[in-house]
Amino acid sequence: MLFNSAEFLFGFAPIAVVGFYLLGRFSRVSAIRWLIAVSLVFYGWWRPLNVLIIGPSILINFALARVLLRLNQGEHSRRTSQAVLLLGILFNVMFLGVFKYTDFITGTVNDVFGTNFVLLHIILPLGISFITFQKIAFLIDVQAGRVTSFTFQDYCTFVLFFPQLIAGPIVHYREMMPQFNAVSCRFDQENVAVGLTLLLFGLFKKVVLADKIAPLITPIYQHAASGAQVPFLTAWVAAIGFTLQIYFDFSGYTDMALGLARFFGIKLPPNFNSPLRAPSIIDFWLRWHITLTRFLTAYIYNPLVLARTRRRLTKGLPGLGGRNTTVGAFVSLLLFPTILTMFISGLWHGAGYGFVVWGLLNGVYITINHAWRLTAARLWKNRRSYDRFMKPVGHLVTFITVCATMIFFRATTITSAIDLVRGTLGLNGLGLPQDLLVALGPLAGILHGIGVVGVSSSGQELIKAGKLICLLLFIALALPNTLQILDRHEPALGIRPGPAKLPIGKIAILKWNPSLPWAIAISAIAAVALVSIGGPSEFLYWQF
Amino acid sequence: MDTQEVLSKFTDILRDLLLDDSIELTMATRREDVPGWDSFNYINFTVAVEMQFGVKFKIADIESFSDVGAIATQVTKMLAATS
């Protein structure tokens, strides 16, 4: 069931919420059990078999976690619990591997060795990548002593809570369970008002903004996949257009998840913080899919760097950072762990070469960004003049790089992705639609002079896409984001209230509060979103 | 060693790491309050602290420190336990 479907919005969600409040009047336990039950219905709606696949995995993970808990409490050696943890991680990785990567590995073997193994086309259980990461995190937390007690009901609530079940935010047990233990399970005006506002903002971002740009972008990628060479301007429309599509799609989905959770009195962690406004690629990853970055940093990058840093320092080799950074330290403590982490991130996003390249490239950019920070600080001592000059450059370079790299995320084949990237570099020519060239009149002659040629299309689609891109860029870059608008009501976990007014350019409007003007504004957003429901659409992150 | 001394050593370590002598750490300083103190430099900082004070954090501790005060408190606690 998709969050933006009529059956979810007008059927499932109201029943789930009202049932929760009604049962909450009698007992908290039954309200929480109701939540688990409706989450299972939600998960199995599209394909009931999904529940049968995820069920045993939940039971095995719960059993392993109990064993870890007992080992921690008893007088057992740390090695035993580490072995159990390793077993648990292997089980989950293999579980994910079988469903998600069997075909990819078979295909790669076929490509490399020229074999003809049959692809099994195993159907991916919904949200398996997100659920697997969350379960691994839980086992690690239990082994590390961060979780000291839990029941089967607690575990099910944590894993199955439907607002975040399919596509995150990826949550930690320790930030969720205290909330579940404290919720009143009763109707609460603020929760409903904030929840509904988040839900409607998210729905609007998804069905109005993301779904409107998608049909203008998709043909370009299909065109490239058919072997056509995509010229400069069209390639950039594809790159920027898709980046905006995925941003509004995924951040819209996240807003809806935050809103739905809030109906139950639960605050999920923030996942997006206007990432396209990031002044550097490092900052971009701290603002884009925040809970994934948090997971990868905590469970892959940090342990790796910590172990390697300690090893180097005990050997008497210099560590990373400060005035004594050496090339060796940089390679060992930054380049290697960063590239490896981003490689895993790419592979996690999807079983395909494009995702791997996308992850690796981001790893390379982050490494370059760090190298630059280390050298720039030495070369350019005056921080104020550095900031004044480099901040705008940083914004521009980050935006261009993020968009161009997204091509690998979206393109169906590596060959077409490379062709599109060539297009963005101007290597496929600077072709403009013939009609557009004619419309430009005398300017066309000058453009001809610098090598711009006419291509046979009306250009209507390109102009339409261009206009929409400008509008979406304005929203993404100039307007406050959902969390900023609602920050006086903690829309996501840990969001602190800022000043009462929102500066938008030279005007300042009052931040969201339960008032008539905001009710009218949100109703208008809701009306536009609701009439757009039912068009062709699918959440991009749904398939992960 | 009291937390104030620990804090001043922390400040020196971080200044050296981020090459920014204007950094002033307090018990309430969070990572996002210091420009450039991202997750990458955070590990470098914690290992530098380990080396300086001769302590060893658990990875779970490193991840859960919410502010500088939490790290300082943990270090003083560990130092008290060894002395």
Image (spheres, coloured by chain):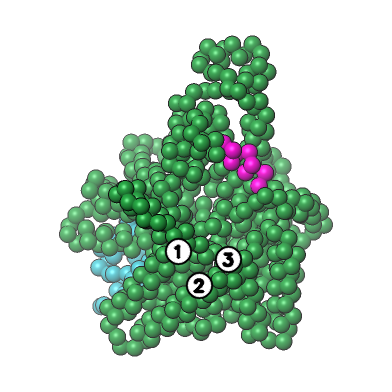
Of circles 1 and 3, the one toward us is 1
Which residue position holds label 1? A99
Which quadrant does the N terminus of chain A fall into? Answer: bottom right
Q: Chain of mark 2?
A: A
- Chain hosting mark 1: A
**Can you say whether A168 is above or below A436 in the image?**
below
Instruction: Assess whether residue A214 is covered by the magenta stretch.
Output: yes
First in residue order: circle 3 vs circle 2: 2
Using the numbered discs, state the Cα–Cα distance from disc 1 to disc 3 in whole angstroms: 21 Å
Does the magenta segment cover residue A159?
Answer: no
Q: Which residue is at a point 73% across and 72% down the rendered structure image?
A: A15
* Side of A122 relative to A91 (left or right): right
Residue B58 percent location from the top left of the image: 33, 71
What is the x, y in percent for residue A454? 58, 19
Q: Amino acid at mark 1?
A: Phe
Residue B17 appears in the picture as rendered: no
Are the residues at dot 3 and dot 2 in contact (C-beta closer than 8 Å)? no
Q: Are marks 1 and 3 on the same chain?
A: yes
The magenta stretch is: A211-220
Q: Which mark lies nearer to you, 3 or 2?
A: 2
B80 and A338: which is toward the camera: A338
Count neighbours of disc 1 (C-alpha within 10 A) and say few if under 14, some if 14 to 19, many if 20 or more: some
Q: Which chain is green?
A: A
* For residue A163, side relative to residue A192 (left or right): left
Which of marks 3 and 1 precedes in the sequence?
A: 1
Q: Label 3, secondary structure: give it.
A: helix
Q: Residues within 10 Å of mark 2 (few under 14, many from 20)?
A: few
Q: Amino acid at mark 2?
A: Ile
